[in-house]
Image (cartoon, rainbow, N blue to C red):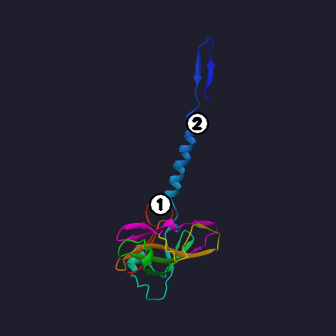
């Protein structure tokens, strides 16, 4: 609040607070500090491959350039910010012809994923942290397959806890699909991706 001062001649002046004592200054300082800390994120934030699966019918070998480009394959375990992600399996599943909800020619694209909290803090997970990438067309994995009771919901994981569930999108079996992990709704670039069927 401004302070009124009266001089010896009876003139009244308003003395304003210095800018560093105003609330807007401190709010701006906190926002700027938040962005600086986010931009200086540590090198531990880079995703890294921690293990490789044996070759199976649902995965193909990826070369070293795929790994360097943060692209993994089904069965790989990827550690990112103290959390391990693993796409256990991927399959296409035909829709129920009596209750078809998918676009013509599309099938359910079902990725079974395990998330393990290896950090020392409780972390949140959400199916909207993931996108299905079909040649650059990014869609949510929020399709509803009435026959599937294992969908991944949102929640929190305490240190050492694990959750497994299905992420369900849609696509054609001939499409080359990837699963992109975005971190959270405030992140614009995917942190890593997993080749699902190519």
Where is the C terminus found, in terms of image quarters? bottom left
Q: Residue at x 44, y 60 (%)?
A: 188
| Separation (CA) of disc 1 from disc 2 | 31 Å
Q: Secondary structure at mark 1?
A: loop
Residue at 51% across / 61% down in the picture?
41
The numbered disc on residue 187 is: 1
Label 1 neighbourhood size at 10 Å, few (<14), some (14-19), many (20+)? few
Q: Which residues are magenta?
A: 114-142
Mark 2 neighbour density, 10 Å: few (under 14) some (14–19) many (20 or more): few
Q: Of 43 and 109, which appears nearest the observer?
A: 109
Q: Do the residues bearing badges 1 and 2 touch, measured as CB atoms within 8 Å?
A: no
Q: Nearer the viewer, mark 1 or mark 2?
A: 1
- Asked whether residue 195 is in view, the answer is no
Mark 2 lies on a secondary structure that is loop
Disc with the residue nearer the chain's start (1 vs 2): 2
Q: Which mark is residue 197?
A: none
Q: Is residue 122 left or right of residue 114?
A: right
Locate residue 98, reporting x and y percent.
44, 76
Residue pointed to by mark 2:
22
The x, y position of residue 28, in whole percent, is: 53, 44
Q: How many marks?
A: 2
Residue 76: percent from the left, percent from the top?
49, 80
Decide if residue 84 is in sight here.
yes
Q: Nearer the viewer, residue 97 or 194?
A: 97
Corner quadrant of residue 106: bottom left
Residue at 57% from the left image edge and 37% from the top image edge = 20
Which residue is at a point 57% across and 42% down the rendered structure image? 26
Q: Is residue 126 rendered magenta in the image?
A: yes
Magenta span includes 32: no
Residue 23 versus residue 143 in the image, above or below: above
């Amino acid at each position: 609040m401004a302070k009124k001062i009266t001089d010896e001649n009876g003139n009244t002046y308003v003395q304003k607070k210095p800018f560093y004592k105003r609330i807007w200054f401190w709010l701006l300082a906190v926002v700027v500090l938040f962005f600086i800390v986010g931009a200086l994120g540590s090198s531990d934030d880079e995703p890294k491959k921690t293990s490789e699966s044996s070759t199976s019918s649902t995965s193909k070998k990826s070369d070293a350039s795929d790994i360097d480009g943060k692209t993994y394959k089904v069965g790989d375990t990827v550690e990112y910010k103290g959390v391990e992600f693993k796409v256990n399996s991927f399959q296409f599943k035909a829709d129920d012809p009596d209750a078809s909800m998918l676009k013509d020619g599309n099938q359910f694209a079902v990725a079974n994923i395990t998330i393990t909290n290896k950090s020392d803090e409780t972390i949140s997970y959400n199916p909207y942290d993931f996108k299905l990438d079909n040649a650059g067309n990014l869609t949510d994995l929020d399709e509803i397959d009435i026959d599937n009771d294992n969908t991944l919901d949102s929640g929190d994981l305490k240190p050492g806890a694990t959750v497994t569930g299905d992420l369900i999108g849609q696509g054609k079996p001939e499409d080359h699909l990837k699963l992109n992990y975005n971190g959270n709704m405030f992140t614009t670039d995917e942190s890593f991706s997993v080749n699902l069927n190519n």
